Amino acid sequence: KDSLTILATVEGSIYDFTAHYPDKLVFYKGNTMERTRYYRMALTQHFSELSRDFEIFGVLPFGIGFYSEHFEAGKEYFGFLLKRKELPSFPSQI
């Protein structure tokens, strides 16, 4: 019943984590196919906002491993990867 609150909390945590560790990727997936589908729908709904700050990938099974591709709305994925885009650097004031 609190899924929107939970998603907002997770989103905030991803922003905080990647602000401290911008070179790390964040992987997540649902514990069921339905939950993963829900996460995909949330990504699709907020894609324009999230894609300003993150590179967004869908993860697919491949043989005994996995590979990632740029996220496509409506495509079924095993999970998702987010990588923080490089933050702009501003010249220091002298």
Image (cartoon, helix red, strand yellow):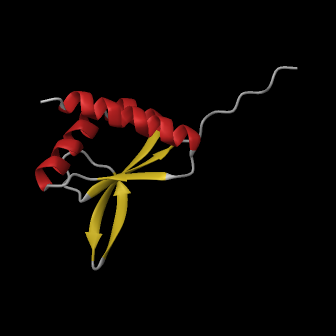
Q: Is residue 4 left or right of residue 18?
A: left
Q: Residue at x 28, y 48 (%)?
A: 72
Q: Is residue 25 left or right of residue 23?
A: left
Q: Nearer the viewer, residue 19 or 43?
A: 19
Relative to 25, say whether 61 is above or below: below
Q: Quadrant of residue 87?
A: top right
User: Number of labelled discs?
Assistant: 0
Residue pushed farthest bottom? 64
Relative to 92, say whether 87 is above or below: below
Percent x, y of residue 40: 22, 45
Q: Nearer the viewer, residue 83 or 3?
A: 3
Q: Nearer the viewer, residue 29 or 49?
A: 29
Is the N terminus in the top left, top right, bottom left or bottom right quadrant? top left
Percent x, y of residue 84: 50, 43
Q: Is residue 52 left or right of residue 79?
A: right
Residue pushed farthest right? 94
Q: Residue at x 31, y 60 (%)?
A: 59
Q: Quadrant of residue 19?
A: top right
Q: Nearer the viewer, residue 31 or 71?
A: 31
Is the C terminus in the top left, top right, bottom left or bottom right quadrant? top right
Percent x, y of residue 18: 51, 42
Relative to 4, say whether 39 is above or below: below
Q: Residue at x 45, y 41 (%)?
A: 54
Q: Residue at x 63, y 33 (%)?
A: 88
Q: Quadrant of residue 11?
A: top left
